Image: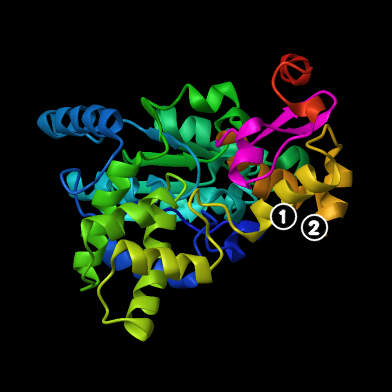
């Protein structure tokens, strides 16, 4: 039950996309865990964060600034709310793209209460002037507000109450080192194991008053791409199928039939993923093939193939990016039930492509 805010990407339209749509946001508000004890998965992060928060409470101080990185849907927003709850503090939520000017950030910071948690999602997308103002705010709890223009401009120092900044990013590499260094605690969110996702699904099913057996939960978990948000979305779609086509109870057979209707296969691939693999295998013999050519073959934009479909295919070991182009792996041929040509068989030169 761990989620993050929406991102304006083509993935938002996919059943297995990790970005949250409006329906996800409405359901997630009811399903989010309220404390670290309820939070499932991310064992190391939970243990480390628990120590940080307990120590801060013992000192009677605000918690250190926290940076959470990882793919969408793994729990960054949820953890920020848990941090506020554990510190018994209010939380203010905003995002990097919403802060385009230093004045936008100054207005938010100047209205914070002592000890308040400021959650800044997609912090890497904040404007550079606001970013530079944030350095001083995080380190000295002070900002300089510029009044006037030109030679007559004056910097007025504005003292801020101690607060905790929780920054979230899906692309930690884009954060400048001076900003990263100002966070007292940094955590990277990992993808979930199927067993953890099964626990997520059972908890969500209980809250949604859905009856599901262990095999049904395992079937959904195996197609959820290691992401709780996707697991919960698939659970809701399977619930709909079970209510219409069966007696409302989710079993392995019901889950499998429902997800077949929604074109999510046993490894979590959807229509777009399979279209990319089928084009790569059937039209180009497994590659190598250029990204632009592959995108034209599946009728999608280059950016959609590269940013939406490829990351999961690469993570699953079904596709490789090489200097000569995209190449299908033996696992891709096996998954689609196709036989690779002799030139792609192991021992016939494909290893050179992966080693290039």
Identify the residue under disc 1.
275
Q: Are marks 2 and 1 in contact (CB under 8 Å)?
A: yes
Residue at the limit of the structure toward the left, as seen here = 58
Q: Quadrant of the C terminus?
A: top right
Q: Which residues are magenta?
A: 316-341
The residues tagged by marks 2 and 1 sit, at their Cα atoms, a distance apart of 10 Å
Q: Quadrant of residue 339?
A: top right
- Is residue 24 visible to us here? no
Secondary structure state at the residue bearing disc 2? loop
User: In front of the other: label 2 or label 1?
Assistant: 1
Q: Tag 1: Cα neighbours inside 10 Å, few (<14), some, or many (≥20)?
A: some
Decide: is 29 above or below 279: below
Image point (54%, 46%), residue name: 122
Q: Position of residue 327 (x, y in %)?
A: 76, 32
Q: Nearer the viewer, residue 85 or 253?
A: 253
Instruction: Indicate left or right for 339 with 131 as reference.
Output: right
Q: Is 305 inside the magenta-drawn segment?
A: no
Q: Nearer the viewer, residue 206 or 221?
A: 221
Q: Position of residue 341 (x, y in %)?
A: 79, 33
Q: Quadrant of residue 188?
A: top left
Instruction: Indicate left or right for 175 with 247 as reference.
Output: right
Mark identifier at residue 300: 2
Q: Position of residue 113 (x, y in %)?
A: 30, 51
* Chain-order first, disc 2 or disc 1: 1
């Amino acid at each position: 039950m761990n989620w993050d805010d929406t991102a304006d990407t083509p993935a938002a339209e996919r059943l297995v996309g990790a970005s949250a749509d409006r329906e996800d946001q409405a359901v997630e508000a009811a399903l989010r865990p309220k404390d670290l004890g309820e939070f499932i998965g991310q064992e190391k992060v939970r243990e480390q964060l628990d120590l940080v928060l307990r120590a801060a409470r013992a000192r009677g101080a605000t918690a250190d600034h926290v940076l959470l990185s990882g793919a969408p849907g793994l729990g960054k927003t949820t953890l920020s709310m848990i941090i506020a709850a554990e510190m018994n503090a209010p939380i203010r939520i905003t995002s990097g793209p919403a802060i385009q000017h230093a004045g936008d950030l100054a207005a938010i910071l100047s209205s914070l209460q002592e000890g308040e948690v400021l959650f800044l999602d997609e912090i890497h997308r904040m404007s550079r002037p606001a970013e530079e103002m944030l350095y001083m705010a995080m380190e000295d709890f002070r900002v300089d507000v510029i009044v006037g223009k030109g030679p007559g401009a004056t910097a007025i120092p504005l003292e801020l109450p101690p607060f905790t900044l929780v920054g979230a990013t899906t692309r930690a590499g884009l954060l400048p080192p001076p900003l990263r260094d100002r966070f007292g605690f940094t955590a990277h969110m990992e993808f979930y194991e199927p067993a953890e996702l099964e626990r997520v699904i059972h908890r969500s099913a209980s809250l949604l008053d859905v009856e599901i057996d262990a095999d049904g939960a395992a079937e959904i978990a195996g197609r959820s791409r290691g992401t709780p948000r996707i697991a919960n979305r698939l659970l809701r779609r399977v619930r709909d199928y079970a209510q219409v086509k069966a007696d409302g109870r989710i079993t392995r057979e019901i889950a499998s039939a429902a997800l077949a209707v929604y074109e999510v296969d046993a490894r979590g691939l959807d229509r777009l993923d399979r279209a990319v693999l089928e084009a790569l295998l059937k039209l180009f013999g497994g590659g190598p093939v250029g990204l632009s050519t592959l995108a034209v073959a599946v009728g999608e934009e280059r950016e959609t193939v590269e940013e939406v479909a490829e990351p999961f295919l690469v993570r699953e070991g079904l596709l490789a990016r090489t200097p000569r182009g995209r190449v299908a792996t033996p696992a891709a041929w096996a998954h689609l039930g196709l036989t690779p040509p002799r030139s792609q068989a192991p021992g016939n030169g494909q290893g050179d492509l992966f080693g290039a």
